[in-house]
Image (spheres, helix red, strand yellow):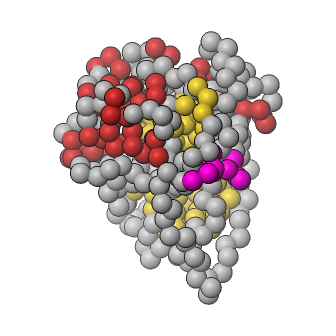
Amino acid sequence: MPLGSGAQFVPANLPAIPGNDTTSRVPQIDDEPIVLTPTAPLTQVLASSGGWGGDRCKTQRTVLATVPIPSGYVLPSNNKNESASFLSADGRTIVSTQPLARCAAGGPATSYVRYPDQDIYGAGIQGAHGGSGMSGLGGSIRIGELRPGQTGPRHSLKINLYARAELATCATQSQCFRWPAVKADGYAVGWYGSVGNNTNAAMRMGALLAIPPSVDITTLGLTTEPGRQIAWTLQNYGAYVVDDTYGPSFAFNAENGPAGNVRTQFRADYGQDFEVYANNTNAWGRDVQRLRQALQVVDNNGPSSIGGGGTPRQPLLPELVAPSSSPTPQAQPTSPATAETRAPGPVTSVPAIPAR
């Protein structure tokens, strides 16, 4: 949904560089395995205790899901979030797991937890982002977006923030998140906002951040095409906070699946990496730092006032209408290892991570 004329903005107070840490990445990518191939070979997703920091190639006997995956798609074990979304053979059920690995072509995939299934014709809110419970599909920068000559992605984006400093302190789990997030990290109480005692209650997991319409984005000093495109999207659609980077960093969520990898596409299009370290910044990195500082919170975003309500800034896309002959998928329970107890999915690499 685009932002609306009724949006009410409050400060987000994001600095140019998270934690003023020059070793942080601004921006960074949180890769999302998006597998929309319902006619591909059915493949088991086996439980793995690898989690964040272990070997995800080691499997257990438990089958978390059986989903279509192209036989040639390989995703090596790593310590990233890898919030995965699979389109089932019925063409409408989205199966979500985290963190995904597929260690050999043609072999089984592995993951730590399966989230409740979603109907692609439904609200599109929930999925495999452990920090918020939000979708690993909606809001991603997709292959074919952010290309030269375009205006910018025509949908809201997803971002990960340095929650320890940039989200508000909270005394209970329910205080740590806001709609459309359905949860916060299991470690949120005592962690969120603990650096600097952030009391900005608008800044919670699930917050919608955007550039207010009163800001002339041509005056922000942006010098790169992808920077200008992201600015347009942030002013017209905004970005939802869906996860914690755990350490100082700022991440966009982007596709890495059988259809391609946004990292590879970005380098081919612009001759540089998407990810930039703050101590080795370039024009693209400086643009993203400027965009962070321009962001504010749409504080009245809610189920009855999406994007703040009022007149949408952009025309709505055609409504998705479910085929009458397709059965409605039934939500599946999560596995015993729920996202509340998982280790955090850092985008940054750290040698050891406390329990989430």
Q: Is residue 316 left or right of residue 279?
A: right
Dominant SS type (magenta): loop
Q: Which residues are magenta?
A: 302-311
Q: Position of residue 243 (x, y in %)?
A: 57, 37
| Residue at the spot 61% in from the left edge and 51% down from the top edge | 310
Quadrant of the image containing the N terminus: bottom right
Residue 177, compared with residue 75, is above or below; it is above
Frontmost residue, 249 versus 298: 298
- Residue farthest to the bottom, as pictured: 325
Q: Is residue 251 left or right of residue 191?
A: left
| Residue at the spot 44% in from the left edge and 32% down from the top edge | 215
Q: Is residue 229 left or right of residue 94?
A: left
Q: Position of residue 336 (x, y in %)?
A: 74, 50
Residue 6, compared with residue 127, is above or below; it is above
The answer to whether one can see residue 284 in this image is yes
Question: Quadrant location of residue 132?
Answer: top right
